[in-house]
Image (cartoon, rainbow, N blue to C red):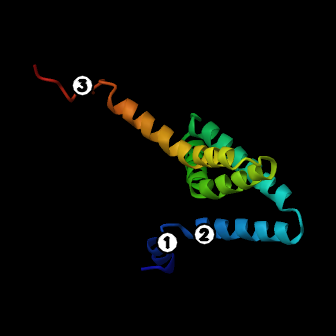
Amino acid sequence: MKWQQRVRVATGLSCWQIMLHLLVVAVLVMGWMGGALVRVGLGLCVLYSVTVILMLAFQRHREQRWRDVGDVLEELTTTWYFGAAIIALWLLSRVLHNNFLLALAGLAILAGPALVSLLVKEKKRNSGDLPAKHRVRH
C-alpha cells in the first residue's frame, strides 16, 4: 500500500486536503503573529464564499470537465466548512457581545447545513414519485 493510501485510511483525508488544512493554519498563525488576524479571517471567509459560488456554477455547467472541476470544489468546500464556520463565528463574536445570540448563530452555522440536507432528503423520499420500474400493485 502506498503511503498516500495509508494516510487516507488513517485520517479519512487525502494528502492535498491535509496540506490545505496546514496551509490555512499557517496563514492564521502568520495573521495572528502580525496582528492582522481579523483581516486574515475575513479573507479566508471571502475565499470560502467565492469557492462555494464557483462550485455551484461549475456543477451546473454543460461540459463534463467543468462539472468535474465543480466536484473537486465540492470536496474542497466540504473539507473546509468547519474551519470556515469557526472563523466566521469568531469574527461574529468580535462585533456581537450577547452570548445567547452567539450560541444561536453558532448552532445555525454549524448545524444548519446538516438539517437542511436531512430535510431535503426526507422530502425526496416522501415525494411519492416512483420510477417506472417500481410498480405499485393494488
Front-most of residues 96 and 3: 96
Q: Which circle marks residue 11 in the picture? A: 1
Q: Amino acid at mark 2?
A: Ile
Give the spatial CA distance, label 3 vs label 2. 44 Å
The mark that comes first in sequence, 3 or 2, is: 2
Nearest to viewer (mark 3 / mark 1): 1
Dot 3, how many residues are within 10 Å of its Cα: few (below 14), some (14-19), or many (20+)?
few
Q: Residue at x 85, y 56 (%)?
A: 39
Quadrant where the image shows the N terminus: bottom left
Q: Helix, strand, or loop for circle 1? A: helix
In percent of width and height, residue 18 lies at 60, 69
Q: Which residue is mark 2?
A: 18
Q: Amino acid at mark 3?
A: Ala
Q: Helix, strand, or loop for circle 3? A: loop
Circles 1 and 2 in contact, beta carbons < 8 Å: yes
In percent of width and height, residue 107 lies at 58, 47
The mark that comes first in sequence, 1 or 2, is: 1
Q: Is residue 51 left or right of residue 71?
A: right
Give the spatial CA distance, label 3 vs label 1. 42 Å
Count of marks, rendered view: 3
Q: Is residue 67 left or right of residue 29?
A: left
The mark that comes first in sequence, 3 or 1, is: 1
Circles 3 and 1 in contact, beta carbons < 8 Å: no
Front-most of residues 135 and 64: 135
Q: Residue at x 10, y 19 (%)?
A: 138
Dot 1, how many residues are within 10 Å of its Cα: few (below 14), some (14-19), or many (20+)?
few
Q: Residue at x 49, y 71 (%)?
A: 11
Q: Which residue is mark 3?
A: 132
Front-most of residues 43 and 134: 43
Give the spatial CA distance, label 1 vs label 2. 9 Å
Q: Helix, strand, or loop for circle 2? A: helix
Q: Residue furthest top?
A: 138
